[in-house]
Image (cartoon, helix red, strand yellow):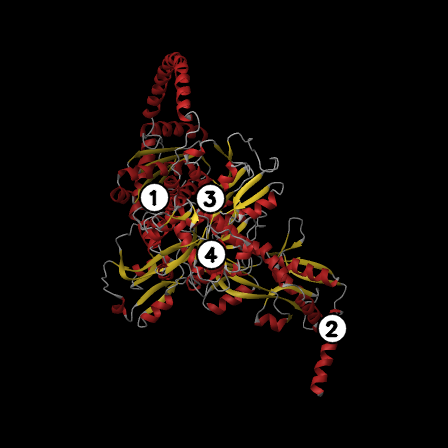
Amino acid sequence: MFRILSCVLMLLLAPLLQAAELSALKAQLKVAVSNDSYPYMFTDEQGRPAGLVVDFWQQVAEAQHLDLEFIAVDWPQSLQLLAEQKVDFHGGLGETPVRAQQFLLGKSYLELTSNVFVHRDLNRVISLADLLPLVVGTVANATHAELLRRVLPDITLKTYPHASALYKAALAGEIKAFTGLDRLSPRYPEFSQLDLLFPLYKKIPLQQIQLTFATHKNNKKLQQALQQAASAVSAEFIGQLERKWLGVATDPGSLLIGVSVGNQPFMHVSQSGEVQGLFVDIWRLWSEKTGIKVAFMPGQSDDLLAYLHKSRIDVQMAQMQHPEKMAGLQSAYHLYNLSSSFYHLSSTPVTGLPDLAGKRIGLMHTSTYAADLKSQYPGILWQEYRTLEAMIDAAQRRQIVGFFAADLMVVKRLNEMNSGSAFTALGEPRFDSAIHSLIRPGNELLYQQIQQGFAQISLDELITLEQRWLDPAMSAYYRKFREQVPLSTDEMQLAQQELNVGVMANWPPIEFIGQNGQFQGMTADVLALLNQRLGARLTAKPYHNWSQLVTDFEQGKLAAVANMSDLPERQAYADFSVDYWTLQWVLLGQAQQESVQTVAAMSPKRIAMMQDYQYLHEFRKSFPQHQLVAVPSIEQAVDIMLKGEVDFVLDNIVAVGVVLTDPALINLRVQIPADLPAEPSYFAIHKNYAQLRVLLNKGIKTISDADRKTIQDKWLNLHVQQGLDRSRLIELILQVVAVAVAVVLVFWIWNYSLRREVNLRRQMEEKMRFMAGHDELTQLANRSLFMERLQSAIHQHARHNELLAVLFMDLDGFKQVNDQYGHDVGDELLVQLAQVLKYCVRKTDTVARFGGDEFVLLLTGLIDRDDAAIVAEKILQCLEDSMVLSVCQIRVSASIGISVYPQDGTDATQLLKVADQLMYQVKQQGKNQYRFSSRKP
């Protein structure tokens, strides 16, 4: 009894105790924050403290009526201020054992990540262990150093006083990796260059940090009061702060989409920082269709999933179906399917996985089939990798005997490496993985927007995008659709079941029972297409009564219903497919009836309409001035209109078209008022068959405009002649007009031919002059014009004592392109390369093709020979991106020799000779680089 009374007393006193704790807060408090820890704490352009931490404590101050003074200083100094009790508390620091001994720490109010940012050129640095040979920069007294030493005790660290000094050292090349939080600071003057060299997608997560506050050891009451005040901040507000400061800056209303990098050709970031790939282009097309702006946030897959959970992004662009990784998230769209196989070196034959017991095999850390493989082959040593490139490299070094990866990605990457024949795929086992675009659950509006947007993208458009990114020889996802839709294992099992689809038996030509007793109509033809392309068993079950059909469907006696409207009251038991047909509502009336621009402006009329149409109720609400007469069939509606009992018949254009095939109805007239809608047709799918919606959507995607036209022409073969044959009248009019126009054309053509001959002669002369100095294929300067410009430049630079450079460039791997794809593709590559080279130089410089795959560049007016190095590096960086050709994507590199006037020669011949020799030295030393001579200026 005493214990119960104690508990009640504590409950009654709790508010008083909390109030007492909060009363410990002074009216004004000084808060130490860092001035360069973006985006958490920093000073803005006006020198005022800003960032997530500042916004958090301002929210606390507003709720508790406090006056906070933020003291923004360098990070080490901010901790020193607290230690010396020159401030009341520190606004934001990571929890560590050392700091727990120094200060009184509060409870964490935010979780953030400590990262190591890695230079973009360090392709093999993909894990923390890969950092050991490097010197890693860090800010003095930052949490990162302590965390990194725990993981890598032997790591070499270089300490800097503040973040700006750290960034400066990174740009100067002193360090190739440095620690930091989620983002680099855009406040840094050279942020653009820093972000380009150390992109977000190259960062390696180090450890989660619990962000908290701290007071001095002597101030326990303040610590408790601050804890009470901070705990009152809502999770919703913290989520808003994360989106504001940790997301990507976007226009209002933009959809922020996470892009998992390192997944060429589907999604990646180029060396120039551009997000690209098949999935990226599909989402850009989605944006065009919907009018909703999108912005892309590149990163590692696991990071992006965490961001999605925390509302930092709206959509994860593509994620392999994986129960653990998709937990707590919702699939918004089934975007793609990928097949994965086992690959091994062709020089090491493998007959089957059972033979590899005790051997090491690679797996992507995102693979959906890892558990199955480990269960089936427990004797194999499975090793996970973060990138495909790392697995290929490990196999080539024989660290693993092979690896499992997505076929399209492997073939694409090996072709880019000119190593297509170096690896062989094992036939079995193979795994199919579904790729989904993910959102947070509960956002029904966004889900519908995504579904509707993808429904507007035709299969032809998807195939075109796929052909842009994938070699035609590759077995791609969308290209298979029309012959046989690619299905997952679960989808194949569902397709093999006999599934009843509710249809109407008396709605010609949409759905009806023909004279032979068989179900016919446009819906029957659509179901036949879906069965053929899905390998499905969708069986039509006709009903004569719509209400009975709806009742049976609601009770789960039907798997689906064709042509059912998506109404709120049906969403409790039904999902809906994308639309597969659109039917325009029209008015059918007597020929003498007035022309109808809009139903709303039309004088009150009597209109007949089939009683089972859902649109009947909507029409009554929208146009109450008109009298609707419900009838069981369109035939009866037409009959009472002919008798004068109604003025119009309201039905869809297909049903009306069939009516007009009757010669007795020659005087009827079809009108399409502007305010009558075009109603989409959906399949309604019962909730018991949720997976069927995905299956039907795949099938509907294969129905092309040509398919729809074939079906429509079959059921709307109209032979209507109303009075004079309109087509014949048009033909006669055209003949008369043609005679009149012919007279005018004869004179005009005679005059035009004279002017054309003069212009052609002038153009031919200009073309001959151009071709005398230019390469016919690339339109670049040829050897003759280049030598002329080089000699002229030498004389000019001699007078002004200036430098010029000659870059002699030869493509690496061009012969393989010609051998594999033919000379036409090789020529196409040369044309694109010419554009790349022109982009890399100034308009005052000259780019020439000397023949084959040899190009020479003349760079004039240089201040230092490093200016030539910058151009060479720019060329090599541009070539790291694949070139999209008509039949494939190609990635080539180049070897470049650079001679400089006057160090390497004072005449054109000598400069060319030196540059050519340096280029061949580059070829011998591994290619894909540039080289100067050893002569000093």
In this view, the mark in front (2 or 1): 2
Q: Which mark is residue 322?
A: none
Decide which of tag 2 and tag 1 comes sooner along the chain. 2
Name the mark nearer the viewer: 3 or 2. 3
Q: Which residue is mark 3?
A: 582
Mark 3 crowd level (few <14, some 14–19, many ≥20, 10 Å Cα): few
Q: Which residue is mark 1?
A: 894
Kind of residue at badge 1: Ala
Q: Position of residue 713 (x, y in %)?
A: 38, 39
Dot 2 falls on a residue whose secondary structure is helix
Q: Secondary structure at mark 1?
A: strand
Instruction: Using the numbered discs, state the Cα–Cα distance from disc 2 to disc 1 in whole angstroms.
Output: 74 Å
Q: Nearer the viewer, mark 4 or mark 2?
A: 4
Cα–Cα span, label 4 and label 3:
22 Å
Amino acid at pointer 4: Leu
N-terminal of the pair, mark 4 or mark 2, is: 2
Quarter in which the C terminus is drawn: top left
Compute the Cα span from label 3 to label 2. Answer: 63 Å
For marks 4 and 2, give the CA distance: 60 Å
Residue 12, quarter of the rendered image: bottom right
Q: Residues within 10 Å of mark 1 (few under 14, many from 20)?
A: many
Report x, y in % for residue 267.
42, 51
Q: Nearer the viewer, residue 139 or 60?
A: 60
Given residues 57 and 523, the one toward you in this image is: 523
Q: Earlier in the sequence, mark 4 or mark 3?
A: 4
Query: Can you identify the residue that label 4 sits on?
Result: 549
